[in-house]
Image (tube, rainbow, N blue to C red):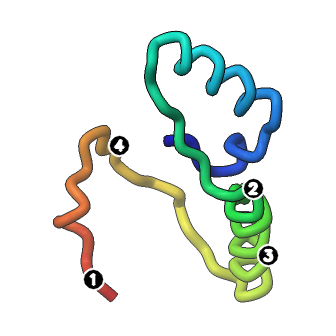
Amino acid sequence: MVAGGVGANRELRTRLVAAVGERRGQVFFPDPVFCTDNGAMIALVGALRLSSAAVSDYAFSVKPRWELESLPVP
C-alpha cells in the first residue's frame, strides 16, 4: 500500500508495480486525488498559531513506539 503525497508520483507507481510484479505481488494505490501532501495543512496550522500568538517551548519526549490507544479521544 502506497499513500500520501509520494503516492501521486507516476514514475514511482510505475516502478513499484514493475518491481513488485516481478515478485508476483500487488501494490495498492489510492486514486491520485486522494494522495495529498500534508504541507498545506502544516502551513495552515502554523499560520493559525502565529495569528493567535500561541507560545510554546517546543519541548517533547520522543516516543518511537507510541501506542495509539494511549491518545485521548476528542
Graded by Cα atoms within 10 Å as few (under 14), some (14 to 19) or many (20 or more), the crowding at tag 3 reads few
Q: Which residue is mark 3?
A: 47
- The relative height of residue 44 versus residue 23 in the rendered view (above or below) is below
Graded by Cα atoms within 10 Å as few (under 14), some (14 to 19) or many (20 or more), the crowding at tag 4 reads few
| CA separation in Å, label 3 and label 2 | 27 Å
What element does badge 1 sit on?
loop
What element does badge 4 sit on?
loop
| CA separation in Å, label 1 and label 4 | 21 Å
Graded by Cα atoms within 10 Å as few (under 14), some (14 to 19) or many (20 or more), the crowding at tag 1 reads few
Name the amino acid, label 2: Pro
Q: Position of residue 14 (x, y in %)?
A: 74, 27
Q: Position of residue 36 (x, y in %)?
A: 72, 59
**Residue furthest toward the top?**
22
Camera-side mark, 1 or 4: 1
Q: Which residue is mark 2?
A: 32
What label sits on residue 62 in the rendered view?
4
Q: Which residue is mark 1?
A: 73
Residue located 61% across and 55% down the image: 30
Name the amino acid, label 1: Val
Q: Are marks 2 and 4 in contact (CB under 8 Å)?
A: no
Looking at the image, tell me whether mark 1 or mark 3 is earlier in sequence order.
3
Residue located 76% across and 77% down the image: 50
Residue located 55% across and 68% down the image: 56
Looking at the image, tell me whether mark 2 or mark 4 is earlier in sequence order.
2
Looking at the image, tell me whether mark 2 or mark 1 is earlier in sequence order.
2
Q: Can you say which quadrant of the picture contains the C terminus?
A: bottom left
| CA separation in Å, label 1 and label 3 | 25 Å
Q: Are marks 1 and 3 in contact (CB under 8 Å)?
A: no
Name the amino acid, label 4: Val
